[in-house]
Amino acid sequence: MNKTGKKVGYLVLGVALVLAPFIIQDKYFIHLLIEAGLFYMLVAGLNLITGYWGQLTLGHTAFVGLGAYTTAILNAKFNATLPMTLGASIIICLIVSILFGLLVLRLRGPYFVIVSLCFAEMLAIVATNWVDLTNGPMGIPGIETSVISLPGLGELAIESKMGFYYFMLIIVAAMSYIIYRLLHSVIGRASVALRENEILSESVGISAFTYGMIIFVTASIFAGVGGCFYAHYYTYVNPELFGFTYTITMLIMLVIGGKGTFIGPMLGCVVFTILPEMLRGAEYLRDPVLGVILIMVAMFFPHGMGGAIKSIGIKFQNREGR
Amino acid sequence: MLAEILQQIANGLIIGATYGLMAVGLTMIFGMMDVINLAHGELYMLGGVFTYYLVTLAGFNYFLAVFIAILLVMAVGAIFDQVVLRKLRGEPTVITIVVTIGLSIFLQSIVVLIWGATPQSIALPFSNNVIQIGQVFFTPFKIFMGVVAVGVIFGLQFLLQNTTLGKTMRAAFQDKEAAAIVGININRVYVINFALGSGLAGLAGALLGTLFVVYPNMGLIAIVKAFLIVIMGGMGNFLGAIVGGLILGVVECLAAGFISSAYKDIFGLLIVMVMLAFRPYGLFGRKI
């Protein structure tokens, strides 16, 4: 695929997504698409950290939970509207990820994996036990409908499925654009260089700490935005948001979708939101099968679906070139 | 007050020794094979589950049941190593982590299918008469736990220092290529290593599962603790894992007794995060 082909492809995909609710008027399907989009917000950041920078984090849910709890607390206790909760989620995730990053970004490999996991567990313990603030294991219900007041245009209420669908599309599009620009900038190239060989990269002046921090903070903010969206969409948060289950779901989407590819995580999110729904009824077999699939994909297709598409594209290009 | 502190420290040392067993298993697998085994918690859980089934359903003697449970967990580990990890030797750690997460999901969901979600307790093999030593009280089972943990650690030490198998393992630990050159079968060493590591997790699961309760999700908090210990002691460091286990056990028990039992799990996490800021190579690790 050449560059124009790619652009046309993304344009068609974009138009199709914008028109989707009009063509498929099934509310349930729209809900699944929103869920897939929500997962993309979380997996996109994970892909930056794990796919491009090459560090595995198991603590991404920490920032999802931070965003969601910030939103829930501000909304339930202070009636904050969506722009405020979104802004607050971003700022809190920014501050916490910088502080956490200063502490742990010097760590590599296993140390980083484990400390990130511990961080998420720690926040889960706090969310469960700090009952005054977080309502403990009961969680915070009744997060209000989201209202955005547009200056000069009146108020826009995001409450219907359609409203959330387009809100999701805007966020996902913005994130994809930021990732695209990031990857084609010095930051993206530096992080890939660090993934391939950190010592060599540092020897030519690429600071692992600086670029790692940029990637980590960006990814954490994405997760916080996802958490904010989650809280508004489901109107309920509880400490399970910090849990390992979400981490595993995200990791499955990332790895099977294809880490370190642009399109892979999107595919992963859509497939692994819709597939489990289709496997309903055989639910008891779902997790064992997923476990085996994860092992097989990691063994035989380490670049996932995105990698497979990429290699087909390269073959296609070679044929055209001849 | 003093008696209370001593009591908590004693409890902490016994529980910590069991944590240490699990952490030693984890550190063995990492140190030799560069595999971060995220299924370690599920192997720990399997230790408890097998023991429960053997005691409750099959009516085995408790000690025999624990022994067989360990062998079964070792078999699970060995099969996983040969079927999956063998194909991935030398791959980046991200790949092996994902694979062990796959195993962890698989084992846990299979156990949920068969077991359900309710916690079960294993019948104690001892009476509940309390034994008093000085100002400190012990139940017989806690003494048994302590004896087993210390025995296994010394047994392992003997195995590694004084037997041919131990020497080949240490050789592979230091330099696998050089070990392979002088004729050591690396694959065999790896599978034994992984099985031993799994067995230690299984033993810890059987002991702590008897002391508390057994349930399918018990592995998660256990693996977090084991990893904390391994980080505290330095990855791949045996002595560090044991001492780290004791420290974590004592800190947890003191925190639960004197500060807050709801937050007791957070203190270990805090210690490790602060320690990493100052000694990122672990308490016993060497600076690179």
Image (cartoon, helix red, strand yellow):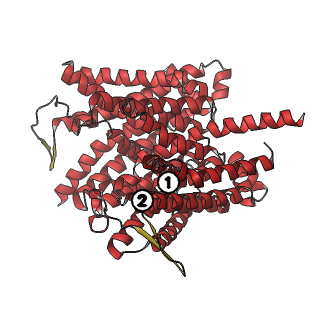
Q: Secondary structure at mark 2?
A: helix
Give residue A285's quadrant in the image: top left
Mark positioned earlier in the residue sequence (1 or 2): 1
Vertical comparison of A238 with A295: above or below: below
**Mark 1 in CB contact with mark 2 (< 8 angstroms):** yes
Mark 1 residue crowding within 10 angstroms, few (<14) / some (14–19) / many (20+): many
Q: Residue at x 48, y 40 (%)?
A: A274
Q: Residue at x 36, y 50 (%)?
A: B247
Q: Nearer the viewer, residue B178 or A88?
A: A88
Chain for numbered disc 1:
A
Q: Residue A97 location, x and y as percent?
A: 52, 63
Give residue A222's quadrant in the image: bottom right
Give the residue at the far right of this rendering: A322
Q: Nearer the viewer, residue A236 or A238?
A: A236
Lateral position of residue A205 relative to residue B265, left or right:
right
Callouts 1 and 2 on one subunit? yes
User: Looking at the rendered structure, which numbered label has been put on residue A38?
Assistant: 1
Q: Residue at x 43, y 73 (%)?
A: A81
Name the residue tied to disc 2: A233
Q: Residue A303 location, x and y as percent?
A: 64, 37
Q: Disc 1 versus disc 2: distance between alpha carbons?
A: 9 Å
Lateral position of residue A230 relative to residue A77, left or right:
right
Q: Secondary structure at mark 1?
A: helix
Q: Is residue A78 visible?
A: yes
Q: Given the image, on which type of amino acid does mark 2 rest?
A: Tyr
Q: Residue A55 location, x and y as percent?
A: 60, 49
